[in-house]
Amino acid sequence: MLVACQPQVVSPGVSPELKHSWEVFFNNGDAEAVAKLYSPDAQLVMSGSPVARGHAAIQSTIETMIRSGVKAHIDAERNFGSGDLAYVYGHYSVLEKEGGHSVEDGHYIELWRRRDGAWLIDLDVNAAGPSPPSDDAH
């Protein structure tokens, strides 16, 4: 009799330090380091923007965001892996500047795949939610 082997689900699937490195690299202005977190054929999908496919397009997209002066804050609410696949899901905020007000809030899901022992992002989908209330709103 054959017994099906169930892959073990682990949390975290991707180390918290690796996951957090996206935010650190971005906030330090290092678009190249951010792009290197993605696989060569990865896709970055953001609300209201064309899909960025591959390192060059992802790096260009990140560079544009960095030049605007915004900063990112990213939480990981779920981080599960099984074998060579993992997903991370959470909330993000785009801040007008370091310590500034949020100009965009939303949720994301990343699909990571381990290749030759290294975890890389294959798909990163970000969905912006309603705009945060402005300080001028009464």
Image: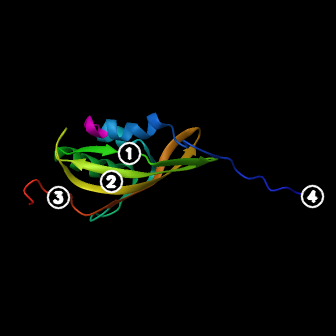
Magenta span of residues: 26-30
Tell me which label, 4 or 3, sits earlier in the chain: 4
Tell me which label, 1 or 2, sits earlier in the chain: 2
Q: Is 29 contained in the magenta span?
A: yes
Figure quadrant of the C terminus:
bottom left
- Most foreground residue, 107 or 66: 107
How far apart are labels 4 and 2 at the CA level? 50 Å
Tell me which label, 1 or 4, sits earlier in the chain: 4
Amino acid at dot 4:
Met
Most distant residue in the right direction: 1
Amino acid at dot 1:
Asp
How far apart are labels 4 and 3 at the CA level? 61 Å
Residue 75 is labelled as: 1
Does residue 53 appear anywhere in the picture? no
Q: Which residue is mark 3?
A: 133
| Mark 4 closeness class: few <14, some 14–19, many ≥20 residues within 10 Å | few
Magenta: predominant secondary structure element? loop
Tell me which label, 3 or 1, sits earlier in the chain: 1
How far apart are labels 1 and 2 at the CA level? 24 Å
Determine the residue positioned at 92% across, 58% down: 1
Dot 4: element: loop
Amino acid at dot 3:
Pro
In the displayed structure image, the side of residue 65 where residue 108 appears, left or right: right
Q: Which residue is mark 4?
A: 1
Q: Which residue is mark 2?
A: 57
Q: Looking at the picture, how far across and down is residue 111, in whole percent?
A: 49, 53
Determine the residue positioned at 38% across, 49% down: 55
Q: Looking at the picture, how far across and down is residue 33, in whole percent?
A: 35, 38
How far apart are labels 1 and 4 at the CA level? 45 Å
